[in-house]
Image: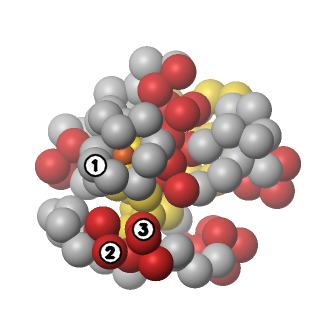
Amino acid sequence: ARITYIEFNGTAHQVEVEPGTSVMRGAVDNGIPGIDGDCGGGCACATCHVYVDAGWMQLLGQRAEIEEDLLGFAQDVRPQSRLSCQIEVTPELDGLVVTMPETQS
Ligand code: FES
């Protein structure tokens, strides 16, 4: 699926990410700055915080409880906030756009 990652400074990176992996992994594997994924996707670091474009929220569904809890420690959390390691890439996510918060710039 084609995913667009937009850094806090506005730099956009469009990459192809394999279904079955995570949105965080797609960024790390492609060397996209701003998503560190320090905990390796264990939902324990919140360095993979992104804002999902409004139109995609419904398709992604609810945040899991563990994700909700960890976002409590993240800065500048908004309704569109998600931890990108908890977003599994599927073919339906083709065209997804995520933006990074200022703390990850
Ligand atoms: Fe650590 Fe997502 S990679 S919480």
Mark before the other along the chain sequence, 3 or 1: 1
Seen at 52% across and 20% down, the residue is 30
Where residue 105 appears, as percent x and y from the top left, is 19, 39
Report the amino acid beneath label 2.
Asp
Given the current orientation, which residue lies at the most extreme right position?
91
Nearest the camera: 62 or 1?
A: 62
Where residue 62 appears, as percent x and y from the top left, is 58, 80
| Classed neighbour count for the residue bearing mark 1: other residues with Cα under 10 Å, few (<14), some (14–19), many (≥20) | some
Q: Which residue is mark 2?
A: 69
Q: Which residue is mark 3?
A: 67
Q: Are marks 2 and 3 in contact (CB under 8 Å)?
A: yes
Tell me if the residue at label 1 has its CB under 8 Å from ligand 1. Answer: yes
Q: Which residue is mark 1?
A: 45
Mark 2 → mark 3, Cα distance in angstroms: 5 Å
Where residue 17 appears, as percent x and y from the top left, is 69, 32
Per the image, label 1 sits on a secondary structure element best described as loop
Seen at 21% across and 63% down, the residue is 74
Left or right, 50 with reference to 71: right
Per the image, label 3 sits on a secondary structure element best described as helix
Q: Please indicate, yes or no, whether residue 94 appears anywhere in the rendered image.
A: no
Q: Quadrant of the N terminus?
A: top right
| Classed neighbour count for the residue bearing mark 2: other residues with Cα under 10 Å, few (<14), some (14–19), many (≥20) | few
Tell me if the residue at label 3 has its CB under 8 Å from ligand 1. Answer: yes
Q: Are marks 3 and 1 in contact (CB under 8 Å)?
A: no
Report the amino acid beneath label 3.
Glu
The total number of labels drawn is: 3
| Classed neighbour count for the residue bearing mark 3: other residues with Cα under 10 Å, few (<14), some (14–19), many (≥20) | some
Q: Please indicate, yes or no, whether residue 27 appears anywhere in the rendered image.
A: yes
User: Splitting the image into 4 quarters, where does residue 60 fall?
Assistant: bottom right
